[in-house]
Amino acid sequence: MGERRLTFRGGRAMALVPFAIFIIITIGLSFANFQDINAMVAAGVIALLIGMLFSKDLDRYWDVILKGLGSKVAMTAVMLWLVVGMYGAILKSGHIVEGLVWVSVKLGVSGAVFTVCAFVFSALFAVATGSGFGTISTMCFILYPAGILLGCNPAVLAGAILSGAAFGDNFAPVSDTTIIAATSQEYKYTNGAASIGGTVKCRYKYVFIAAIIAAVLFFVFGGSGNTLDPAEAENLLKQYQMPQGLLLLIPTLVVIILAVKGVNIFASLGTGSILAIVIGLGAKLFKPSDLICIKDGAISGTITSGVSGMFNVSILLMIVVSMGELLIASGCMEAVVDWLNNSVIKTERGAEISMFCLSTVFGILIAAINTIANICVAPFINAIGKKNDIHPYRRANILATTICSFPFFLPFGGCVLLLLGGISSQTDAYAFLPKLGAGDMIATTFYSWAIWAVMLVSCITGKGRAFEGRNGEYIEAKKNPNK
């Protein structure tokens, strides 16, 4: 006998109240340029408390919320984030960025070629660390001033950094986007959710097509800036060079290879972390005290800061997952999906386009942090996909690629605001830096536009469409084999 349905005053549609309140507050914070995770956590708690007022059974209401907070979907993502936070912090402290800059200088690139390199280096760093925000905040301090000095177009160079961050965010096995997109998409005919390695393996064909398109555009439009004093450029670049930092690309490749081969993602990340520590210590990229240090009764260091940096967003994830649990327990999610299937979705193509459009809309509405948009829309993608037998890998790929488009170039998006803040903070040190407006990167973040277009074409044409077999198998076809 199944669990009794959660009922609300005003009908099951009232289960959307907490979700709607949270989204409205989040959008308001976005337009106010106030992307604070703590404020979003508070908004989530307030939304759940207000939603309680509409529930007919308070005990059942909170039981459902607690079930969502402790669900396997939430806990898997939280544990992965904690491990990823530590792993990414180790790579950053190992001067991987300085290694990438060293390569650029040795190759003697400038202008449009440097803009392409900025895209590639940002993408490599984002794939290595799994952090789009971390990539933007790091690369804007190194690649942007250097690129301006070497004759890059400012808006296109900024778009290249944003594009590289988007590439890594939707492709890296260790990124929050990949983790959420995979772990949130459950199988219909068997237990479990999509594996991270499996989704990444199926996704590469889309992201590399988009990356090639973007690289060509960066080469065509990236070199129309004014070249400044070469001596000043040389001095700046000398400050950020360390060839040994490239050694930390080794654990990055190991993690990707292990994940794609189907090795447990925790084991893959654990192996990569240990390898990064061994290489970093052996090459003297950092000291043991840089990793963890106990002084005056307080613990500090790269490892602890990396883990602690994930705490608030982990709590936020749990809260939003609990909101999704309310939609399921009340029958609201089922009703929405049934309405879509009866009124909107008539074919497999319609199901995929619906998932694509929902991901796009949520990405626009919650552009402050694409992770939150990902979390919010994932339950709807999961429900629509399961109803239409779309394989979890395919669902995860539609979600992960589409959600990394608009949030990376909209003027009120967190990524753009973070980049502008980083550039603005450097104007005192580098008076030559040109000012950029929030709308300057809309047309120059080529990768995000390209991946959005590539996935739209894929959904329309059915290229890469895959269904879930009766035993969970991956079946590539344009028509549902189960019907």
Image (cartoon, grey):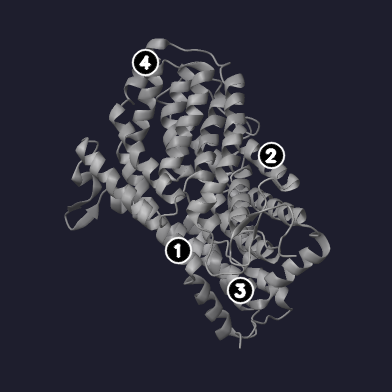
Task: Say whether disc 2 or disc 1 marks the residue closer to the N-terminus.
Answer: 1
Q: Secondary structure at mark 3?
A: helix
Q: Mark 4 is on which residue type?
A: Glu
Residue under pointer 4:
234
Question: In whole angstroms, how far apart are the C-alphas of marks 2 and 3?
Answer: 34 Å
Q: Nearer the viewer, mark 2 or mark 3?
A: 2
Question: In whole angstroms, how far apart are the C-alphas of marks 2 and 1?
Answer: 31 Å
Relative to 383, is 115 above or below?
A: above
Q: Are marks 3 and 4 in contact (CB under 8 Å)?
A: no
Q: Mark 3 is on which residue type?
A: Leu
Residue 393 in the image, given as x and y percentages of width and height: 58, 55
Q: Quadrant of residue 330?
A: bottom right
For the C terminus, the image quarter is: bottom right
Task: Say whether disc 3 or disc 4 marks the residue closer to the N-terminus.
Answer: 4
Question: In whole angstroms, how far apart are the C-alphas of marks 2 and 4?
Answer: 39 Å
Residue under pointer 1:
76
Q: Secondary structure at mark 4?
A: helix
Binning the other alpha carbons within 10 Å of mark 4 as few (below 14), some (14 to 19) or many (20 upward) gives some
Residue 295 circle label: none
Q: Are marks 1 and 4 in contact (CB under 8 Å)?
A: no
Q: For the view shown, which residue lies furthest in the right direction?
A: 343
Q: Secondary structure at mark 2?
A: helix
Q: Nearer the viewer, mark 2 or mark 4?
A: 2
Residue 453 circle label: 2
Q: Quadrant of residue 187?
A: bottom right
